[in-house]
């Protein structure tokens, strides 16, 4: 029996919940893991929500979490910009949750797209033509492009839904400008954020997620153990065929209970 992880890095969409419904058994399994003394962080490529909104959603599903234990591509992007750049102004193609995280990190927003040093692109589930056009103006005026993540789709109640790659494509294909940095999983900024919060060595951590390209790839790249769950974007046959081989394949996160025994 391999040594059990001391820290859990848990994805949200497709792993803990799917749209508004929680995965059966998820809350129980996570509560048991916390009771066993495991440290837990939630690591999500969601860039359209802020951490308080996620904390509320988890709490409604019976999962207690501190804001600092929730790491989103929006909050990690905001930390990156505030840590590495002073005196910048940012334009967003995204939702209020993204702007809230930028404000919390002290990153100033530009008044006009043409004045922005950075364009931050994230998931925007209610995007309009005018918003796309403003982002187009920012990029054409020379703003560098940060994407909170580059996922092509995310699992919603009604099936796969268009993700940030669609927003990125609209801007890069019309301006000819490349994306300068992608923050989300499997990127190093997300791995560093999770390890920094857990204060554990990579091989003491287990990444649990539904995406081979983001969750499993991150765990394998950064020396962590990995468990793929089949409640989101990946089927068992897709997992078999992939070059990203997880250590465990679980029908759902409810299986975490058995792992802890
Ligand atoms: Mg997911």
Image (cartoon, rainbow, N blue to C red):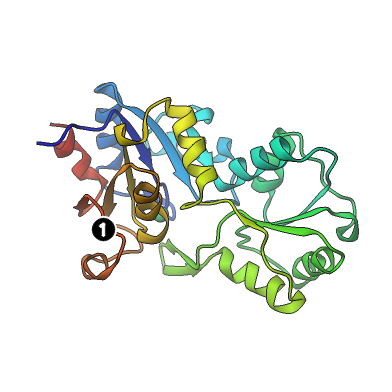
On the image, the x and y values in percent for residue 126 come to 65, 63
On the image, the x and y values in percent for residue 32 come to 24, 29
Find disc 1 in the rendering and name its residue: 245
On the image, the x and y values in percent for residue 46 come to 53, 51
Looking at this view, is 196 or 129 the one in front? 196
Instruction: Answer with the quarter of the image where residue 106 lies.
Output: top right
Question: Considering the image in quadrants, where does the N terminus appear?
Answer: top left
Q: Residue furthest bottom?
A: 174
Any atom of ligand 1 within 8 Å of the CB at mark 1?
A: no
Q: Is residue 65 above or below residue 156?
A: above
Q: Is residue 114 above or below residue 13?
A: below
User: What residue appears at the point 37 percent right and 31 percent down from the top-left corner?
Assistant: 40
User: What residue appears at the point 24 percent right and 43 percent down from the top-left corner?
Assistant: 25
SS type, badge 1? loop
Q: Is residue 243 left or right of residue 236?
A: right
Looking at this view, is 63 or 229 the one in front? 229
Q: Is residue 19 left or right of residue 1?
A: right
User: What residue appears at the point 33 percent right and 35 percent down from the top-left corner?
Assistant: 8
Q: Is residue 221 left or right of residue 131?
A: left
Q: Is residue 248 above or below residue 156?
A: above
Q: Is residue 196 above or below residue 258?
A: above
Q: Ligand 1 is in which quadrant of the figure?
A: bottom left
Whether residue 121 is visible, yes or no, is: no
Whether residue 106 is visible, yes or no, is: yes
Question: Considering the image in quadrants, where does the C terminus appear?
Answer: top left
Instruction: Answer with the quarter of the image where residue 256 lies.
Output: top left
Looking at this view, is 102 or 224 the one in front? 224
Q: Residues within 10 Å of mark 1 (few under 14, many from 20)?
A: some
Badge count: 1
């Amino acid at each position: 029996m391999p040594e059990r992880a001391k820290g859990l890095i848990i994805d949200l969409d497709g792993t803990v919940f799917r749209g508004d419904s929680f995965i059966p058994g998820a809350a129980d399994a996570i509560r048991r893991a916390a009771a066993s003394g495991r440290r837990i962080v939630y690591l999500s490529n969601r860039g359209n929500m802020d951490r308080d909104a996620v904390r509320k959603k988890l709490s409604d599903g019976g999962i207690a979490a501190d804001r600092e234990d929730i790491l989103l591509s929006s909050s990690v992007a905001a930390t990156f910009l505030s840590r590495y750049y002073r005196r910048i102004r940012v334009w967003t193609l995204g939702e209020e949750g993204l702007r809230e995280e930028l404000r919390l990190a002290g990153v100033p927003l530009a008044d006009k797209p043409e004045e922005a040093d950075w364009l931050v692109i994230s998931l925007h589930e209610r995007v309009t033509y005018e918003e796309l056009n403003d982002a187009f103006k920012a990029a054409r005026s020379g703003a560098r492009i940060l994407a909170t993540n580059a996922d092509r789709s995310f699992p919603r109640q009604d099936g796969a839904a268009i993700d940030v790659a669609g927003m990125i494509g609209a801007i890069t294909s019309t301006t000819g400008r490349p994306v300068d940095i992608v923050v989300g999983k499997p990127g190093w900024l997300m791995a560093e954020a999770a390890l920094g919060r857990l204060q554990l060595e990579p091989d003491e951590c287990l990444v649990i997620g539904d995406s081979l390209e983001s969750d499993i790839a991150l765990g394998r790249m950064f020396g962590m153990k990995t468990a793929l769950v089949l409640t989101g974007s990946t089927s068992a046959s897709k997992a078999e065929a992939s070059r990203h081989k997880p250590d465990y394949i679980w029908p759902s996160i409810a299986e975490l209970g058995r792992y802890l025994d």
